[in-house]
Image (cartoon, rainbow, N blue to C red):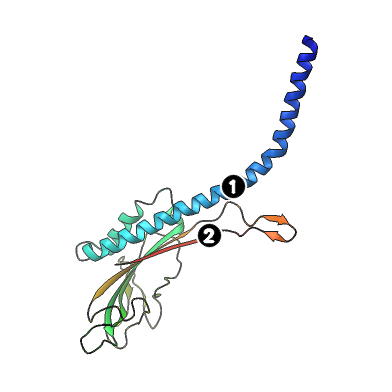
Amino acid sequence: MRTRSLRSRRASRGIVSVEMALLLPMLVALALPVYDIARNIQAQMILINVSREGASLSSRASLTYPMQTIMSSLTATTPPLNMTAHGMIYITEIMGNNNCDSSGNNCTGVVVAQYRWNGGNYYPASQLWSCGNSGTRWATDGSGGCSGIPAAGSTSPVVNLLQGKLSDGQIAYVVEAFYLQTPLIGSLNLGGGIKTPALSPNLYAMTVF
């Protein structure tokens, strides 16, 4: 009886081991996409918070602190994201100036200043307006500002954001946060020509204040 019991236990253990060997790859294949999605959600939420807080700080403290100080303080709140290697922040100042009505309202915004974080090594183009157009260029004085932007007027760069929403001379700050997060896995081939969608590595958030 004891011999049969031992054999039965060994057989059961062997069956469990075989089942685990068969199921483990499937479990890993299911877990990795879930983990990847969770990473992207976490990173996106951090970027949203950075853009929101950055827009608020820019509107309240831009006359007190340099924009680089504001952007560096924002990136200090982003772990576990590695903003230095894979992130970027732009702060763009727009002013209501063009196409105002007779009361000085419903103006189109123009770019009067733009700043880029100096601490990052990832340089995606701003989705609002990119310095380097129309004779503008990034300054080399450490400010991270865009030089050569015309004074507010008919020759200033026009942006579609908040079009018709600003009054003449009203200032709005736009903060854009970028992050490059490479997915752990790409698209999965399920067979029969069916593939799962791959996550985009380019994460982005923007807030206007």
Q: Amino acid at mark 2?
A: Pro
* Residue at horizontal 33 percent and vertical 76 percent from the top: 162
Figure quadrant of residue 64: bottom left
Circle 1 Cα neighbour tier, 10 Å, few/some/many (<14 / 14–19 / ≥20): some
Which numbered disc covers residue 201?
2
Circle 2 Cα neighbour tier, 10 Å, few/some/many (<14 / 14–19 / ≥20): few
Where residue 199 sits: x, y (%)? 56, 58
* Residue at horizontal 74 percent and vertical 24 percent from the top: 12
Q: Eyeballing the image, is 69 above or below 79?
A: below
Can you say which quadrant of the picture contains the N terminus? top right
Q: Eyeballing the image, is 25 above or below 74?
A: above
For residue 159, say whether it is visible.
yes
Front one among 49 and 3: 3
Q: Amino acid at mark 1?
A: Leu
* Residue at horizontal 58 percent and vertical 50 percent from the top: 33
Q: Secondary structure at mark 2?
A: loop
* Residue at horizontal 80 percent and vertical 11 percent from the top: 3
Instruction: Answer with mark 1 or mark 2, whichever residue precedes in sequence.
Output: 1
Which numbered disc covers residue 32?
1
Can you say which quadrant of the picture contains the C terminus? bottom left
On the rendered structure, is 41 left or right of 168?
right
